[in-house]
Image (spheres, grey):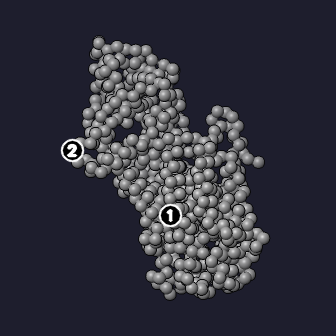
Amino acid sequence: MSPVTAGPSGALQKHPTTLALTVGSIGVVYGDIGTSPLYALREGLAAATRGREATPQDVVGVVSLLIWLLILIATFKYVILILRADNRGEGGTLSLLALGQKAFGGRTRLLLTLGIIGTSLFFGDAIITPAISVLSAVEGVTLVAPGFSHLVIPTTLGILFALFWMQRRGTGGISKLFGPVMLVWFAVLSAMGLWHISDDPTILRALNPIPGLNYLIHHGAGALPVIGSVFLAITGAEALYADMGHFGRRPIRLAWAFVVFPSLILSYLGQGALVLSDATMALDPFFLMAPDWALAPLVGLATVATVIASQAVITGAFSVAHQAVQLGLLPRMDVLHTSATQEGQIYMPRINLILLVCVIFLVVSFGSSARLATAYGIAVTGEMIITTLLAFVVFRYLWSWKLSVIVACLAPLLTVEIFLFAANLTKFKDGGYLPLSVATVLAISMATWVRGTTQVQEKSRAKSVALATLMTSLEKSTRLCRTPGTAVFLTAEPVVAPPALLHNLKHNGVLHERNFIVTVATANRPHMPPEEMVKVEELNDTFTRVRLTFGYMDQPNVPKALRQGVKFDIMQTSFFLNRRTFKITDNKDLMGWQKRLFLALTRMASNAHDYYHLPSNRVIELGQQIGL
């Protein structure tokens, strides 16, 4: 039975069992890496043979490289090491960034740069996974019906359009099927692999790393394209850490150890044995493992599995974008909840549209999963390097591990990842430039947004009036009209008078009987408990300073949070916002192109009253112009 505890409201809440969480993680966390057998060995052998017939040394060497990448990167790095670095249960690049900032007591330029690069590379990777996964599955239909080849692209586009359209409706109901479906998928991988290992048992030599190392030594620099291709076997390895908050460390580790890892190993061994027994099978070893009667059902199952893998990537993109907004790396964006019970199920319309456009462009431009494979690798290997560097900061400066232990653990991994990055750079001209270009544009945008908002805050602070000074002058004023009710002023500077308050006094000449000076901050933790979210300071009979602190995965609902610290009647309360407009000046704080980019980003930002969940009929906006 599932354990039952009392929730915040006193109602009984049922918590999923470890078994349920483990099955759930199989559907969400492992969808991407679980569908890599569709194309990883095929592309690895294609890079190794370059049109000639595969030799036993090619097959055993490539399979050995596939298996040991799974052991070193997925198992040792992510499952054993990086999963330790949870930020109050949450994982991902931005969680590592938050932990690193905690180690140094705040934001540092180096860590911020690493976080921006890592986040940008994540999105560079995210645009490829849905395209290559769905396209590779649909291509399997041509083995059943060769005349279907001209419909592969339209069918793929139809599936992708439906997938992205479905996001606005939420995936809570259908996601319950993800775990069981992927469990069947991994069972099929295991069964087909076991069945074909007997085709040529010499493939078991690939369990030893020596054949893989010998292949690399024998081919030298010529092995780089092969490394870039076999890297496809660990696509989605970063999801083991990124999705930790949804399922927890233990279920993810159990799923990997007892289901996912054995299934992947058996699948690659089975595919390798099949090719050893008949070199012509290298054309598409995964689907050719199936007997004729099972090929059509296998194609159908593969299509469903790749849609699940794509869904996991899209959901992850929403989560990362939301965290980036909360940490101040991106402008405010609309966030819609698609589930009344699952806080993590969100939908971000703008991110969904951007992903859809990019994915459709990739499918149409490249036209096949084989060509798309040439675009994959640079972004994700770069993200892996960033993860390792941030892990070094956390292990050394937050957890105080011995330097010798950290070097022994991370130096070999960093060496392998740099080698993988170099190998994938060989794909740059063949399509690798696309995800890297997306990541570069996003990194520049985030860096500009961070620098621009810092400049705006400094300029606003320079023209500000201390709140204490204003309160003293107001106490002496006899001409001021005082009106009943409550006014809430949102501001980034708690010690200075909010510009909206100054404008209201100057133009309207009124002061409410109660005034809350509210600042909203984001903590270096995913969620804030209610008792720590609100800090109230009574300044005098008229003014109260309130500091609201949300976790970087919390929804910044200001009215709801305020009710936990102060009493007010929402129908007698006005929320005052400062609407800033910008004009380009001759100052040199930002370069000309950065100013124009910052202005474009500010126009993209969602309305503050929507973002902070303020009642629209109780909001008053007062303007302020700032020169850039």
Q: Quadrant of the C terminus?
A: top left
Residue drawn at x 73%, y 66% as measured from the top left: 296
Q: Amino acid at mark 2?
A: Asp
Count of labels in the image: 2
Residue beneath label 2, please?
586
Left or right of 390? Residue 3 is right
Residue 134 % position (x, y): 61, 61
Residue 64 % position (x, y): 59, 79
- What's the CA distance linking mark 2 and mark 1? 42 Å
Of circles 2 and 1, which is in front?
A: 1
Residue drawn at x 57%, y 85% as measured from the top left: 52
Characterize the local packing of mark 2: few (<14), some (14-19) or many (20 or more) Cα atoms within 10 angstroms: few
Residue 436 % position (x, y): 43, 63
Residue beneath label 1, please?
365
Task: Work out whether residue 120 can be spotted.
Answer: yes
Image height check: is 205 above or below 611? below
Element carrying mark 1:
helix
Q: Nearer the viewer, residue 388 or 307?
A: 307
